[in-house]
Amino acid sequence: MIDDLFHTGVSLADKAIRTVAVYVTVAALLRLGGKRGIAQLNNFDFVVMLLMSNVVQNAIIGPDNSLAGGLAGLVILMAVNAVVVRLAATVPAIGRLVEGSPTVLARDGGYVRSALRRLGVRQADLDVAIQLRGGTSVADTSLVRLEPGGAVLVRLRPDEENAERGDVAELRTRLDRIERKLDALAGTGGST
């Protein structure tokens, strides 16, 4: 029984080749599937992701059910991912190849319907993202973009943006000046 835990059914080289091949294939499929696959997982996408992990499990470990074989596959998978992530971060061409580029989903208050269709993003899902960032509808936006990592960037029109701390401080300073001027006018009886 102890021997079954540590005796691998396949060589480490075989396991490495299997792991890298599965990693590249899954990454390519996710890249082809689009950014929405990660950004906006719906119930069906979630089921596919769960089943996909189960489907590729045997492709990675092969006929090896040992603890050592499973851990070796895990270490190889994590190492390959670390290398790819670092390469994508340091070499822009690899980053674009692996992650893609941003996609504009809405511009100047209107949806880019062709992009929504191509990525399979529903308007209702985009409306939720807009509302989470302080807008009421797509009409309140100047730009909505799906980033390569799956994040939705929403830029509201300037007149729709919320006040920030600096804006409030500037208004407070202006109000203080107005109050001082009013107090000065009241102290002089209103004559100048």
Image (cartoon, helix red, strand yellow):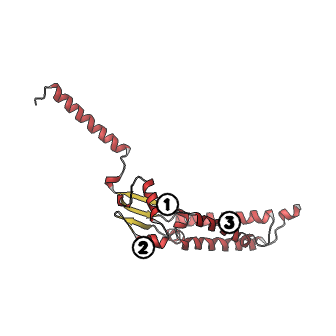
Identify the residue under disc 2: 114
Nearer to us: label 1 or label 3: 1
Q: What residue is at 59 percent from the left and 73 percent from the top?
A: 29
Tag 2 and tag 3, C-beta contact below 8 Å: no
Tag 2 and tag 1, C-beta contact below 8 Å: no
Identify the residue under disc 3: 77
Nearer to us: label 2 or label 1: 2
Task: Pinpoint residue 155: horizontal percent, then vertical percent.
Answer: 39, 58
Q: What residue is at 26 percent from the left and 39 percent from the top?
A: 174
Disc 1 secondary structure class: loop
Between marks 1 and 3, how big is the CA–CA gap? Answer: 25 Å
Identify the residue under disc 1: 151
Between discs 2 and 1, the one toward the N terminus: 2
Between discs 1 and 3, the one toward the N terminus: 3
Between marks 2 and 1, how big is the CA–CA gap? Answer: 19 Å
Task: Pinpoint residue 144: horizontal percent, then vertical percent.
Answer: 41, 62
Q: Is residue 160 above or below residue 62?
A: above
Q: What residue is at 47 percent from the left and 60 percent from the top?
A: 152
Task: Pinpoint residue 172: horizontal percent, then vertical percent.
Answer: 31, 38
The one nearer the camera, 54 or 21, is: 54
